[in-house]
Image: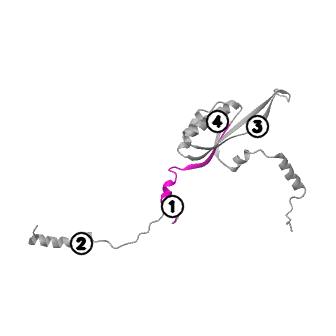
């Protein structure tokens, strides 16, 4: 290609703007803020976080008067939780509670009949439950809830853990006796 006088003049007019466009910018420093909160944490840890909010630990408590029905329903709930890929960390039973019910004659204090009711309780502990999966589990649990069985779902607390263990009566009696004697002494051996 040969340059003519017209092309050369046009090239001189365009050349300064082309030079500016092709110029390499000076090195600049940019500050990038780490979203994970720490300078020392790698970026891939952010991708390991769960996609949805999670419930840390949930207790599914079922109570009823009919033992076989309650056991069957607990097995069903365990199967539903496994089907929904929920982490069932623990299943346990609490000791049955005895309740005595008296029926009185109308307008009197005479006992007409007396009943002893036994309430059974079973618990499932679920860990790391995704928020979108929880309503599905709850709907299935309520839809299959047998008559006479109550369902309660709550977050796991220390009280839930304490209820699992039967207190040692002898140990409690020894502690009471020690308190009556003045409590433990804090003497060091020489």
Residue bearing mark 3: 97
Q: Earlier in the sequence, mark 1 or mark 4?
A: 1
First in residue order: circle 2 vs circle 1: 2
Residue 104: image x %, image y %? 82, 28
Instruction: Choose the circle earlier in sequence order: 3 or 4.
Output: 4
Q: Specify few, some or many for label 4: CA neighbours under 10 Å numbering under 14, 14-19, or 20 or more.
A: many
Residue 90 point in image, percent of width and height: 65, 43
SS for dot 3: strand
N-terminal of the two: label 2 or label 3? Answer: 2
Residue 36: mark in rendering: 1
Residue 61 is a magenta residue = yes
Q: CA distance from mark 1 to mark 4?
A: 40 Å
Q: Tell me whether the residue at label 3 lies in contact with that at label 4, contact meaning CB atoms closer than 8 angstroms.
A: no
Q: From the image, tell me which residue sits under label 4.
A: 74
> Does dot 1 land on a helix, a strand or a loop?
loop
Q: Secondary structure at mark 2?
A: helix
């Amino acid at each position: 290609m040969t340059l003519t006088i017209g092309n050369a003049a046009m090239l001189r007019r365009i050349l300064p703007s082309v030079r500016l466009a092709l110029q390499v910018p000076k090195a600049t420093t940019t500050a990038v803020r780490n979203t994970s909160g720490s300078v020392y944490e790698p970026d891939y840890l952010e991708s390991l976080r769960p996609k949805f909010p999670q419930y840390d630990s949930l207790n599914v408590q079922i109570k009823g008067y009919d033992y076989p029905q309650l056991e069957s329903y607990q097995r069903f709930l365990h199967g539903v939780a496994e089907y929904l890929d929920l982490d069932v960390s623990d299943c346990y039973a609490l000791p049955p509670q005895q309740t005595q019910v008296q029926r009185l004659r109308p307008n009197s204090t005479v006992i007409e009949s007396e009943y002893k009711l036994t309430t059974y309780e079973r618990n499932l502990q679920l860990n790391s439950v995704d928020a979108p999966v929880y309503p599905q589990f709850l709907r299935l649990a309520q839809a299959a809830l047998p008559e006479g069985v109550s369902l309660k779902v709550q977050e796991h607390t220390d009280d839930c853990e304490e209820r699992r263990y039967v207190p040692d009566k002898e140990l409690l009696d020894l502690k009471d006796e020690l308190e009556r004697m003045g409590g433990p002494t804090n003497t060091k051996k020489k």
